[in-house]
Image: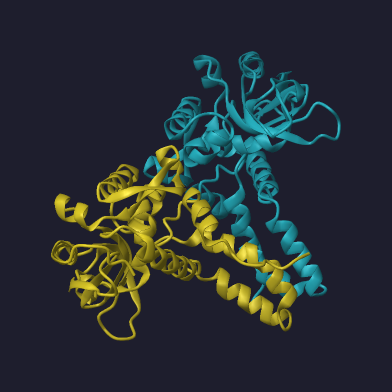
Chain colours: A cyan, B yellow
Amino acid sequence: MNDVGGVDVTALQSEGLRRGDECHNRNVASSAALVAQLAPSIARRAQDANAAADLLAFMAGNPHFFLSFSIASAKAIGDAAHRAGEPGLVTAICANGRSLGVRVSGLGDRWFTAPVHVPRGLYFPGFEPEDANPDIGDSAIVETIGLGGFAMAASPSVVRFVGAGGLADAIRITEEMAEICLGEHPHFRMPTLDERGTPVGIDVCRVVETGIAPLINTGIAGRAPGTGQIGAGVVRAPLACFEAAVAALVSEPGPRNG
Amino acid sequence: MNDVGGVDVTALQSEGLRRGDECHNRNVASSAALVAQLAPSIARRAQDANAAADLLAFMAGNPHFFLSFSIASAKAIGDAAHRAGEPGLVTAICANGRSLGVRVSGLGDRWFTAPVHVPRGLYFPGFEPEDANPDIGDSAIVETIGLGGFAMAASPSVVRFVGAGGLADAIRITEEMAEICLGEHPHFRMPTLDERGTPVGIDVCRVVETGIAPLINTGIAGRAPGTGQIGAGVVRAPLACFEAAVAALVSEPGPRNG
């Protein structure tokens, strides 16, 4: 019996979409799949039985365990797209609780930033909107590779979890995101849309032309330091980021990849 | 860290429907969930690390590992319904490769049987319809508790796997099965149908009145002994079983539960 020899995150994400995860706000099925994939090697290689059991319990007990793998994979893909892509492709999105920034191919290492909104969503018991911080975190990079809000149609459960409706609303959101994307993902197929690929490749020009801001599935963090996650919802990336990127593309024409 | 202390199969099935399983022909997400749930205890309690690893690899390597749990749970529920239910409820379905039989509450331990069909579906590479045996197995009991074909809408991936179309077809099948059922399941909710419960409680009178035969998601077994599974598809339970049960209900009126 061999060890795992690496984890194909894209394959897990592709299968995750078949299991109702959009791989940002819902990772529970992909997390279980990853635990099942790694469990034999963990049991075999751990220092002792209790160490294996504790590690497996930690992994299995966190329904978002897979999210870190998604983020790391999206960063690698985003960086490759940034080097290779045609100018104007969004290759990273992140927020720090005050500003949201986007990185755009053809425009170097700059971040185009604007004040970030507070997500709309549902709150865990004991919390309400005034406890919320504006959006924070680097996980929105998964939206740039066709997951999260862009894959909403694959996850009718998550739209309910974030207070955004049912299957029809989930499909509507994915179809709206398709209007600002250059293509459909060849591997991230949605059984709820009869195997159509998720929209991928956010084009800053299309965002500005349509006025459709990328929709991000996100956790809601508490304002008070140390509170952690207090809910889950959706947030739109501010249009000003994309307007600034388009202005830069226009004023600085020519190949500037890298 | 405590041991598992029992497995709530109904909870796993309910969550499985959120993960694209209908828990008969597609069990891959529920199998991973079960592996993740049991892995810590297996790692802690196994005789040695290799035994734990081998067991976990066996469990994680079989995408239908959860099916046996579903069948056993459905048998317990079906038996309880048989004792308690009003006359005319289908409490078990099974087939032996020649006949399909149904057991009906109010009609004792008899089986109402008729020749069983060959499933329609897709074949694994190297096999074709003439290699197929008429339907065989006891797994169709899960259809009597609102899973399998009755939960088709929850699993658009499975309709494609069995060659039965896309999401609209999956929803149509579940809605057709609702016409022959007494209710909707309180726990088996389908995110693809905005949290509606799966149809449950097959009523032999409704089957005969509507002419709608229960649709079973099933594996296709090879005719040649030892071949095993050669494909996956759907099969209708023969109407003659239900006609015979209705005739028995009419000719033998009165309470006969048990």
Q: Quadrant of residue B130?
A: bottom left
Q: Is residue A7 visible?
A: no
Residue at 31% x, 42% y is: B168
Give the mark count.
0
Q: Position of residue A82 (x, y in %)?
A: 64, 35
Question: Image check: A243 left or right of A168?
Answer: right
Query: A139 and A129: which one is in front?
Result: A129
Question: Image check: A210 left or right of A245?
Answer: left
Question: Image check: A127 left or right of B184?
Answer: right
Query: A162 and A195: which one is in front?
Result: A162
Q: Seen from this angle, which residue lies furthest right?
A: A225
Quadrant for the C terminus of chain A in the image: top right
Q: Judge whether A94 appears above or below B33 on screen.
A: above
Q: Seen from this angle, which residue lies furthest front?
A: B254
Query: A28 and A151: which one is in front?
Result: A28
Q: Judge whether A220 appears above or below B111 on screen.
A: above
Residue at 29% x, 44% y is: B175
Question: Image check: B79 left or right of B45?
Answer: left
Q: Seen from this angle, which residue lies furthest bottom?
A: B225
Q: Is residue B129 visible?
A: yes
Q: Position of residue A133 (x, y in %)?
A: 76, 25
Q: Judge whether B143 appears above or below B151 on screen.
A: below
Quadrant for the N terminus of chain A in the image: bottom right
Q: Position of residue A171 (x, y in %)?
A: 44, 33
Query: B208 and A80: which one is in front?
Result: B208
Residue at 69% x, 20% y is: A117
Q: Position of residue A153 (x, y in %)?
A: 47, 37
